[in-house]
């Protein structure tokens, strides 16, 4: 059995789809709002706000069957500007609630936590961060994810350092930036995208499929406790916008290049310019030759 905490999010929805397609397991889909969760007899929705001790106890109870669970913990306060402005509220979700959950559950079969490339801080185009690099996060979001990784790995869990993820939302209730770009282009509205914020970006579907493969493997074999789960490619949001316009046959000329270092409107909190990750360890673990965005 799988349990996903934060199952109604972008990645959570893709994980549900991947687990249903690639395994025969049932899923406990825990989320603050369960409306819009995938309708399938193998999916059991469970309302859970991770900051509510009562909800966490109920979730721990739902997970305590005869068979240990494979767990994906995705719930996070993860709007980078929001975390910077409200670090205490973010701490309550990202650290305190996670610690309470880890303390409440029976030992799982495996547990994967969604960390981020933001734990590394600012990088260079010539260097891809490996899992052994020193962590120098630029703000509260990256620092809280780094602290959360320690909690998770101390309990035998795994941290997946994820890059910027891009893809259509599977939820009718919320649109991803991907969907908003398509809407704008369809309406003839231009979209300004950064050329100098470069990441090892991947699409949600590929991240979800790799994460499920790792969980299936972790049940019977050793999987490294910290892994960069990212693409071979180095892509800016401008590159992604151009690819999307091309894929959807929408006007590429409406994708306008802007530089993050010169823009003071789109983002408030400081972000890394370049932050590329090395995925050698992931590829060795899963026996992959290459890993690229499926777009
Ligand atoms: N998006 C990226 O590019 C990216 C990159 C690296 C790492 N990550 C990490 O990947 C994970 C999934 O991100 P995503 O892109 O799928 O974004 P998302 O859709 O916003 O997922 C975050 C999830 O956390 C849930 N959540 C927040 N507070 C909660 C609470 N108190 N109780 C229960 N659930 C709560 C949200 O539920 P509500 O809908 O109810 O708010 C949402 O389902 C996050 O941990 C994020 O930090 C994302």
Image (cartoon, rainbow, N blue to C red):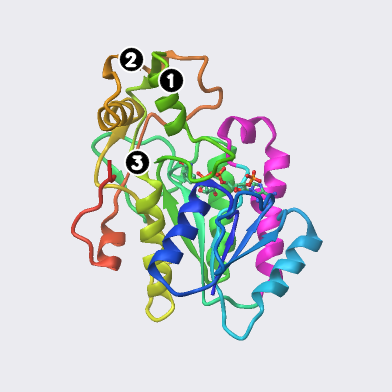
What residue does disc 3 label?
201
Comparing marks 3 and 1, which lies closer to the viewer?
Answer: 1
Which numbered disc, 3 or 2, marks the residue that appears first in the sequence?
Answer: 3
- Give the quadrant of residue 127: top left
Q: Distance between the Cα atoms at labels 3 and 2?
A: 22 Å
Rendered residue at 42%/13% (across/down): 189
Is residue 272 positioned above or below 93 on the image?
A: above
Rendered residue at 72%/40% (across/down): 88
Image mark for residue 3? none
Q: Is residue 28 left or right of residue 21?
A: right
- Mark 3 CB near ligand 1 (8 Å cut): yes
How would you rate the neighbour count of disc 1 (Cα within 10 Å): few for under 14, some for 14-19, many for 20 or more? some
Which numbered disc, 2 or 1, marks the residue that appears first in the sequence?
Answer: 1
Asked if labels 1 and 2 touch by Cβ distance under 8 angstroms, the answer is yes
Answer whether residue 260 is visible to the viewer in this image.
no
What residue does disc 1 label?
184
What residue does disc 2 label?
254
- Mark 2 CB near ligand 1 (8 Å cut): no
Indicate the position of residue 246 as horizontal and vertical percent values: 25, 28
Asked if labels 2 and 3 touch by Cβ distance under 8 angstroms, the answer is no
Residue most extreme to the left: 289
């Amino acid at each position: 059995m799988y349990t996903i905490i934060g199952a109604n999010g972008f990645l959570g929805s893709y994980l549900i789809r991947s687990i249903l397609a690639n395994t025969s397991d049932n899923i406990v889909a825990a989320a603050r709002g369960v409306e819009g969760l995938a309708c399938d007899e193998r999916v059991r929705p469970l309302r859970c706000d991770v900051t509510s001790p009562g909800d966490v106890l109920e979730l721990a109870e739902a997970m305590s069957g005869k068979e240990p669970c494979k767990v994906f913990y995705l719930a996070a306060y993860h709007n980078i500007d929001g975390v910077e402005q409200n670090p205490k509220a973010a701490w309550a979700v990202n650290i305190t609630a996670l610690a309470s959950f880890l303390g409440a559950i029976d030992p799982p079969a495996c547990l994967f936590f969604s960390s981020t490339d933001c734990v590394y801080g600012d990088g260079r185009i010539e260097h891809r961060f490996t899992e052994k690099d020193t962590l120098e996060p630029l703000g509260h979001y990256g620092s809280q994810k780094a602290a959360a990784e320690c909690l998770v790995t101390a309990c035998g869990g795994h941290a997946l350092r994820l890059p910027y993820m891009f893809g259509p939302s599977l939820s009718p209730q919320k649109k991803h930036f991907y969907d908003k770009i398509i809407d704008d282009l369809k309406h003839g509205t231009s979209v300004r995208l950064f050329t100098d914020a470069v990441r090892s970006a991947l699409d949600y579907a590929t991240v979800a499929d790799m994460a499920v493969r790792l969980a299936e493997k972790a049940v019977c074999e050793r999987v490294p406790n910290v892994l960069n789960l990212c693409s071979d490619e180095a892509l800016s949001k401008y590159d992604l916008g151009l690819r999307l316009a091309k894929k959807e046959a929408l006007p590429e000329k409406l994708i306008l290049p802007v530089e993050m270092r010169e823009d003071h409107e789109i983002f408030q909190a400081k972000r890394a310019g370049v932050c590329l990750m090395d995925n050698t360890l992931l590829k060795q673990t899963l026996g992959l030759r290459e890993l690229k965005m499926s777009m």
